[in-house]
Image (cartoon, grey):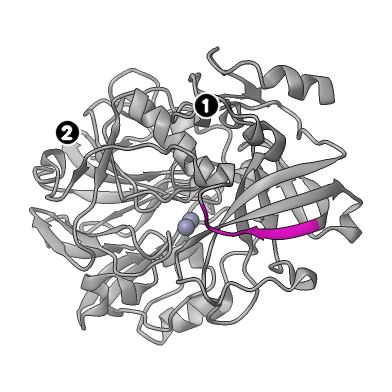
Amino acid sequence: MKERKVQRRTVAKQKVTARLGPYKYVSHTGNPFFGDSGEPLSEPGGTVYAALEVERAEGEGRQAVFLECVDASWLDGLQVNDPTWLHRAPMSAIEVDDLFGSFALNFEEEPEGAIVWLKLEYSAVAAHEADGMKFNRLFTGGFPIRFDLVEQILAGPDHPVHKLKWVEVDVLTEPPRPLRALGEIEGVVAFDVGQGAMQGLMRRTEDHVVPVCYIDLGGGVLQNTHTFPSAFRQTCFGTRPPVVLSHWDWDHWSSAFRFEGALNSKWFVPPLSQKPLQQAFALILFEANALHIWKPTPGRIFFAGSVTWNLCTGRTTNDSGIAAVVQYGHKLDRLLLPGDAAYMHIPSAAAATSFNSLIMTHHGGRLKSKHVPTAAAGAVAICSVGAGNSYQHPFLDTFEAHAKQGWPLPVLTGSHGSRPGHVYLTSTQPVRGFGGACYTGSGCQSALKVA
Ligand SMILES: [Zn+2]
Ligand SMILES: [Zn+2]
């Protein structure tokens, strides 16, 4: 097992392609973390440098926290300091439930959303002794680890983590052209991607509705990889749809590695922070000429035909991205697409307006703020969630908070018999599930035949 890992570290410029069960992942020349090994890769122990986003705990219940890590000795020996280190570095993700309780670190001095770096020494242990889980690939399970040492790496020029070069691109401040001219939207699909999110804004072409814009292209990863429906093998890029990324969490972009053509689309993304795994993905998009960072002033709202783009006002990754209000169908019903943002941080949702439909924020998980927008008469709620996920989403408390504002129990993706179980929302018919059809003959499974 160990030998195999060493081999993998040398594949930097080779194409990474791999298989997990019946699933073929898209080949790319990026970091091997995004290729699949088939089996969880483990090691007896080691040392990593880990980037952590500071988030203030609010609301009830524990929340899993993810660290984005780089092998420490590799980074200590880094010679060529340009952004291509992101393709080569041995990277991993570590999940912790309880933020280093016994090491008594606190980040109260740091503003919310700040990235702090830690040095972590760890050993592989039995599950009942574990402080967390380590994942050496995006699409595999992890192995339990115990922390032997946790230290904050203070700011300063001397440490290698403070000298790293990151992806730099010019940022757009106005709505990019492809997002200004989306035309009439017949309805919206919440695709069944397991524990993650992917939505399509659908336009009518003859007897199908097809995606003309994706909002997120995610799906189950790490210990929730299995929640992705293995029969969902390809999505439609026939209309050259742009992809808008609500925020940089991997459950919202991971299917870029599942669907052939995803890396050729134009991606419009919020600014990214200096965390290694999201940067490593951004570098892949950048090298494919697909990366377009949209960085307007937080709180701005852009009216662009059928879509109102909202720039969220919070500080964390979840709360500072892009949300959308989509007007669809003949009645121009209004759907709120919040990504994982707290509703209070979405300008259109913080205002006292009601919506005809919404996709519940954060997969129906913990609500960071109690503010929930009001439901219009006959409203529909949808929740994008993977059955059997490790976070136990969705939460009944979250459904209750929505019910108080008039929302019915949500329709869940993947919950109506055979999978994929996408959910189609339009104003002319009741919400319906479907498995996916192809209209171009390319074998995609994301169009819907309509009468
Ligand atoms: Zn998410
Ligand atoms: Zn998120």
Q: Is residue 220 visible?
A: no
Query: Which quadrant of the structure image shows residue 235?
Result: top left
Q: Is residue 421 above or below residue 396?
A: above
Residue in the image at 50% along x and 19% along y: 27
Q: Position of residue 442 (x, y in %)?
A: 35, 18
Q: Farthest residue to the top: give it.
A: 14
Span highlighted in magenta in the image: 149-156
Which residue is nearer to you in this view: 429 or 180? 180
Which residue is nearer to you in this view: 444 or 76? 76
Residue 151 among magenta residues: yes
Residue 309 as seen in the image, left or right of residue 316: left
Q: Farthest residue to the front: give it.
A: 158
> Label 2: few (<14), some or many (≥20) within 10 Å?
few
Residue 365 as seen in the image, left or right of residue 313: right
- Circle 1 sits in a helix, a strand or a loop, which is it? helix
Q: Amino acid at mark 2?
A: Thr
| Mark 1 lies on residue | 87
Residue 298 as seen in the image, left or right of residue 151: left
| Mark 2 lies on residue | 205
Q: Position of residue 394 (x, y in %)?
A: 56, 67
- Quarter the N terminus occupies: top right
